[in-house]
Image (cartoon, rainbow, N blue to C red):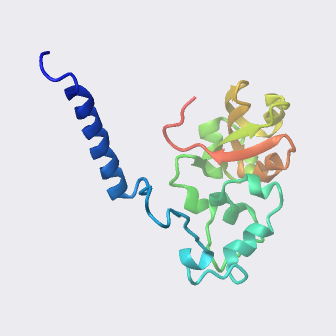
Amino acid sequence: MTGDPMTRPRIIFFIVLIITGTLVAAGCVSHPFAENNSTEITVSPSTISPNLDQQNDWAYQYRNNLTPAQKKIPAELLPIIDPNFPKDQWTMTTKDLADYPYFIPAENASQELNISESQALEHGGEIKVGITLQPSATLDIIDPFATKILYKNEKWHYVGAWIGMNNLETVASIPQVNKIELLYPGVTF
């Protein structure tokens, strides 16, 4: 390349200048000579939701009164398993879950999971869940409560299983259980 040896540094300088100017104009960086470089934003609950009143919010009150075991259970299932759930706010029954692929109604559970009819009725329907355990726990701790174990992963301390709806809170009350989550379609073992 023949020509002025300073051409390349000048081109780089102008490219950096153009990029810097664009970033300052877009607000991504502050101008070094600006008087107020503060980008601090203050957000209060009234900014987010002006009518938020936690003292009168039934969901807030309900969540604060959950037992430690109930806090491990998916929120979608609490209206069904918790007799203290405010039914005037939201009603849901096992019949409402019948269309979901992670639930088997009691009347179908004996055929689909190969269990006795009395066991299926006693369980109140079966729910497909993933259970995360503490690292020190043995995965076999879930076996007595599971209708059918789908998967065990030692590395992630995780068990996939069909659990009776009436056993869900018992499983959640096991101290070594960290969390229970629904296994949605597409989660296979």
> Where's the C terminus, which quadrant?
top right
Residue at 19% across / 28% down in the picture? 7
Q: Position of residue 135 (x, y in %)?
A: 80, 31
Of residue 175 and residue 34, the one placed in the foreground of this image is: 34
Side of 184 relative to 162 (left or right):
left
User: With respect to residue 184, does 57 lie above or below?
Assistant: below
Side of 50 relative to 146 (left or right):
left
Residue at 61% across / 75% down in the picture? 45
> Where's the N terminus, which quadrant?
top left
Q: Position of residue 116 (x, y in %)?
A: 72, 40
Is residue 107 visible in the rendered image? The answer is yes
Is residue 127 visible in the rendered image? The answer is no
Side of 159 relative to 26 (left or right):
right
Residue 8, by quadrant, is top left
Of residue 134 and residue 167, the one placed in the foreground of this image is: 134
Residue at 72% across / 53% down in the picture? 73
**Farthest residue, direction top:** 1
Of residue 138 and residue 98, the one placed in the foreground of this image is: 138
Residue 57, by quadrant, is bottom right
Number of marks in the rendered image: 0
User: With respect to residue 4, does 85 lie above or below?
Assistant: below
User: With respect to residue 24, does 3 lie above or below?
Assistant: above
Q: Position of residue 119 (x, y in %)?
A: 75, 45
Q: Position of residue 61 (x, y in %)?
A: 74, 75
Residue at 63% across / 78% down in the picture? 89
User: With respect to residue 53, does 101 lie above or below?
Assistant: above
